[in-house]
Amino acid sequence: MESYLYVLGILALTVYGQIIIKSRILHYATSRTADDYTSFLLSMFFDPWIISVFVSTVVAAAFWMLALRNADLSLLYPFMALTFALVPLFASLFFGEKVNTLQFFGLLMIVGGVSLATMAR
């Protein structure tokens, strides 16, 4: 059970990272630094929110190591696919990105696939 809590934390941190990166890109895209790749990337790398994403990535890696102490990789790894469903849903919620019907069914298939992969245990 403990391993699943770590995986839940990893999923949350991964979604957090993707949403923050996109929001900061949108922030800097409206400035003139977006035209100069070097300036844009430097602005991004030194942005406090982006630094928080780097920290969350390290925490997620630590959670992954802790999760794998008590569970099989073949059991836990399919859960990482849920990020492919969660990120588009949160992008739709926060940025108004469209998820069309075909994408929605694809996301459901990912969730179904993870369910099948883990129920088989």
Image (cartoon, helix red, strand yellow):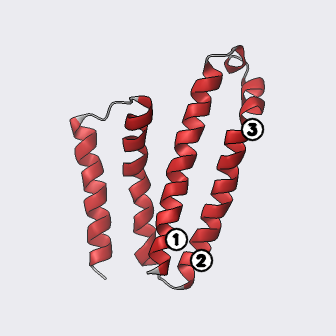
73 to the left or right of 39: left
Which quadrant of the view contains residue 49? top right
Note whether 30 is above or below 103 in the view shown.
Answer: above
Mark-to-mark CA distance, 3 and 1: 27 Å
Q: Amino acid at mark 3?
A: Phe
Label 1 secondary element: helix
Q: Residue at x 63, y 65 (%)?
A: 61
Label 2 secondary element: helix
Note whether 99 is above or below 64 in the view shown.
Answer: above
Residue 32 horizontal/vertical position (percent): 70, 14
The disc, 3 or 1, on the residue closer to the chain's N-terminal end is 1
**Can you identify the residue that label 2 sits on?**
66
Mark-to-mark CA distance, 3 and 2: 28 Å
Q: Are marks 2 and 1 in contact (CB under 8 Å)?
A: yes
Q: Amino acid at mark 1?
A: Tyr
The disc, 2 or 1, on the residue closer to the chain's N-terminal end is 1
8 to the left or right of 112: right
Q: Residue at x 41, y 42 (%)?
A: 90
Mark-to-mark CA distance, 2 and 1: 7 Å
**Can you identify the residue that label 3 sits on?**
45
Q: Residue at x 21, y 37 (%)?
A: 101
Q: Amino acid at mark 2?
A: Leu
Q: Residue at x 65, y 62 (%)?
A: 59
Give the label on residue 28, or none: none
Residue 94 horizontal/vertical position (percent): 44, 35
Residue 17 horizontal/vertical position (percent): 57, 47
**Can you identify the residue that label 1 sits on?**
6
